[in-house]
Image (cartoon, rainbow, N blue to C red):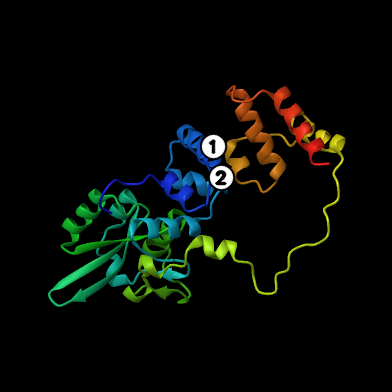
Amino acid sequence: MAGKKLKLGDMLIEAGLINEFQLRSALSDQRQWRRPLGVTLVSLGIVEEAELTQVLSQQLGCDVIDLDGKIVAPDVVKLVSYELATQHHCLPLAVKTAGPVSELYLGMFDPTDLNVIDNVSFRTGLRVRAVLVGDHQLSEAIDRSYRKGDVYNRLHQITPEDIAPANAIVPVRSMVEEPPGGFEPQTEAPRPRDPAAFGREFDLLLTDEAPAVVETSSVLNSTDPGVILHALIQQLSAKGLIDLDELRNTVETLAIDKE
């Protein structure tokens, strides 16, 4: 992690997971709701949390762990108080002892936060090694490990062997871009679209017939592309970033050109 620290948006663009327009949209949403960029990107559905943690792990050279179905062992979780874990959004995962030195693996959404690492190290008397965890997974694991427990004794207690080094993670792009075995490209020519119909679809997004956009939280949780696109157009128009008439003409022109 020496040298100039890359910004998260630059990392994800470099990895090919987002583009400049998606980054600008996420930054706008981030300014409005004042939450971390990574959380914003996942909430907007631009990237998956697993993709985000993989990219960060590789870029930062940081260990990473998948906490799904796992719980911290009782003797480890008591090393860090619940108050400290929630305050710093961190979770003690496991302890590894090598000779006279004991190392605490600490799950963090931001493994570059040295203040948290130093504070936990001071309070526990252990050397702390940051481990990257997805934000949503980390929140669930904190609640599970400190409050809910393993009622049915079905969860796996975390050990140092569950923590993967950055170089053990498969690059995200290779998994996305390589087609599965037996994949054959589509040979049937796509059916032509009616420009008028395309224009009507676009008009629907700008009229009262479109799904009503309510609170932003409802839009973020929606799986309806129409709702999401309608909300995006409304926000861009309200901020004066686009002209609706000009956008409509551009869309109709593009539809005709593809014929």
Amino acid type, residue under disc 1 in the picture: Ser
Quadrant of the image occupied by residue 95:
bottom left
Question: Residue 25: which numbered mark, if any?
Answer: 1
Give the residue at x 47% y 35%. 33
Badge 1 marks a residue whose secondary structure is: helix
Q: Residue 235 at x, y = what percent?
A: 61, 29
> Where is mark 2, residue-wise?
44
Give the residue at x 30% y 51%. 112
Please tell me how crowded label 2 is: few (under 14), some (14-19), or many (20+) other residues with Cα within 10 Å: some
Q: Residue furthest left?
A: 100
Give the residue at x 60% y 35%. 215
Q: Quadrant of the C terminus?
A: top right
Q: Residue 113 at x, y = what percent?
A: 28, 49
Please tell me how crowded label 1 is: few (under 14), some (14-19), or many (20+) other residues with Cα within 10 Å: some
Figure label count: 2
Q: Is residue 98 left or right of residue 152?
A: left
Badge 2 marks a residue whose secondary structure is: loop
Quadrant of the image occupied by residue 63:
bottom left
Q: Residue 203 at x, y = what percent?
A: 79, 31
Q: CA distance from mark 2 to mark 1?
A: 9 Å
Question: In the rendered structure, are the residues bearing label 2 and label 1 in contact, judged by CB atoms less than 8 Å apart?
Answer: yes
Among numbered discs 2 and 1, the one appearing first in the sequence: 1
Q: Quadrant of the N terminus?
A: bottom left
Q: Is residue 60 left or right of residue 234?
A: left
Badge nearest the viewer, 2 or 1: 1
Q: Nearer the viewer, residue 137 or 195?
A: 195
Q: Nearer the viewer, residue 238 or 159?
A: 238
Quadrant of the image occupied by residue 250:
top right
Question: Residue 160: which numbered mark, if any?
Answer: none
Q: Residue 222 at x, y = what percent?
A: 65, 46
Amino acid type, residue under disc 2 in the picture: Leu
